[in-house]
Amino acid sequence: MEYYAPKQEVHYCYPGEYKLLPDLELLSDELRKHREGIVLQPLINMKEDETAVVIDAAVPGARREHFLIEAEDHVLSIALLMKCTAEEEQDNHFQLHEFNYACFNRQVVLPPNANPELAVASYNNGMLHVYLPKEKESAPKQKLRIVLY
């Protein structure tokens, strides 16, 4: 009677360690499941110093009229709403499509002394840049819309 063990590829890595290669089909299925039903969010960088808070967001393919930027209760809300027509969707034959921000609402908590009344926002070459100066005292909590240039 012969015993057949399941084949598993073993790859040797320098210096002499071995690691089993993951099942690529299983990994692909898990990644596909993870992406379904989840709204994509843009990647954000936030820098803060004594004078200001600077937020940069990577949002390629949008136009400035698609954004709605608001601040309320020390929370900055960056919303995007882009609607593609049926013709535009049929014309897009991507081989690889990793960013697709049709709509999202990304929220960032601001420090209490960030002043959204004096905020400046711009969108250029796929990057959204929001500059919020700081004050010595806490800024008001009212809802403000920030104009995007």
Image (cartoon, grey):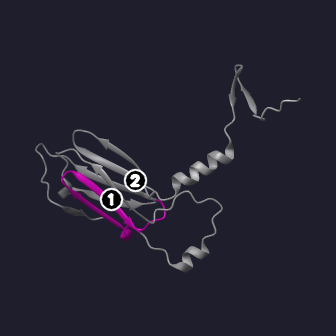
How far is the residue under mark 2 from the one under mark 1? 9 Å
Q: Is residue 20 visible?
A: yes
Q: Quadrant location of the C terminus?
A: bottom left
Looking at the rendered structure, which numbered label has been put on residue 47?
none
Residue 33 place in picture, x, y as percent: 55, 53
Does 149 lie within the magenta span? no
Residue beneath the point at 18% across and 53% down: 73
Q: Residue at x 20, y 48 (%)?
A: 114
State yes or no: discs 2 and 1 in contact (Cβ < 8 Å).
Answer: yes
**Percent x, y of residue 1:** 89, 29
Q: Position of residue 48 (x, y in %)?
A: 28, 41
Q: Spot the residue most to the front.
A: 1
Tell me the mark number nearer the camera, choosing from 2 and 1: 1
SS for callout 1: strand
Residue hosting label 1: 78
The correct choice, above or below, for 93 with respect to 27 in the image is below
Boundaries of the magenta span: 60-81
Label 2, on which residue?
Answer: 57
Task: Residue 126 in the image: state x and y as whole percent.
Answer: 45, 59
